[in-house]
Image (cartoon, coloured by chain):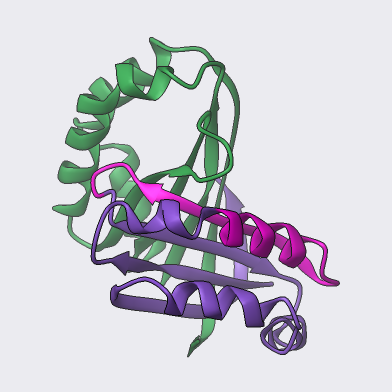
Chain colours: A green, B purple
């Protein structure tokens, strides 16, 4: 399994509300992709400018296919329409998993 | 590296605000632990009852030590004071990591 985790930091706490509809569409379309196990955006409880990203994919191939999907185009356009101060995303292949 | 990911689903969207101070204290204390790389709570943008959890730890040992820390006691008490409908948390050891 591949876990994508990280964040997008908006310049202004109101920026997310300007792209909320696009984010919902992106989540909905991504969750319907083959190999997508989870695809979530969430606002950090301590920082309203920080959008946390958590995705789970069945394979590297599923993640690579995701980046080429048509629904990425309006999502990237939405992100480009607001001021983003920082962005950090990493993808990890998992080995052992434990319930906690 | 160990990634902990998952969620806590509150019965009511207002429940998180009742434990906000305890959550802040838990995040602050956990981030100060040896081996903690990240410790975040965030509210899902599509569901205000859903608190997303994302943690990163240097090792299984660091995570196991975390569960035994004294600051877990008031945090568990705070969680027990609100109605939780579901809870799902998994810890994954990572192998290959890629920037995305």
Which image quadrant is residue A87 in?
top right
* Residue B44 inside the magenta-drawn segment: yes
Q: Position of residue A88 (x, y in %)?
A: 60, 39
On screen, residue A44 above or below A16: below
Q: Is residue B53 left or right of residue B68?
A: left
B9 in relation to A9, above or below:
below
> Residue at position x 36%, y 77% from top?
B88
| Image location of residue B96, percent across then percent down | 61, 67
Q: Quadrant of residue B49?
A: bottom left
Vertical relation: A74 (above or below) B92: above
B46 sits left or right of B75 in the view: left
Q: Residue A22, image x and y in percent?
A: 23, 26
Question: How many numbered marks appear?
Answer: 0
Q: Residue at x 34, y 63 (%)?
A: A57
* Residue closest to the eye, A9 or A31: A9
Q: Is residue A93 left or right of residue B61?
A: left
Residue lying farthest right? B34
Where does the magenta region start and end? B21-47
- Report the front residue among A96 and A84: A84
Question: Does residue A20 appear anywhere in the picture?
Answer: yes
- Residue B84: % across, % down: 31, 74
The image quadrant of residue A47 is top right
Q: Residue at x 37, y 69 (%)?
A: B8
Residue name at image x 38 percent, y 24 percent: A16
Q: Nearer the viewer, residue A2 or A18?
A: A18
Along the viewing direction, whichever of A95 and A19 lies nearer the viewer: A19
């Amino acid at each position: 399994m591949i876990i994508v985790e990280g964040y997008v930091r908006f310049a202004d706490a109101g920026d997310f509300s300007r792209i909320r509809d696009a984010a919902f569409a992106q989540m909905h379309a991504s969750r319907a992709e083959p190999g997508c196990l989870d695809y979530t955006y969430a606002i950090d409880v301590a920082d309203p400018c920080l959008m946390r990203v958590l995705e789970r994919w069945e394979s590297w191939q599923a993640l690579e296919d995701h980046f080429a999907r048509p629904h990425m185009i309006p999502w990237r356009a939405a992100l480009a329409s607001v001021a983003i101060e920082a962005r950090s995303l990493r993808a990890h292949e998992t080995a052992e998993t434990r319930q906690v």
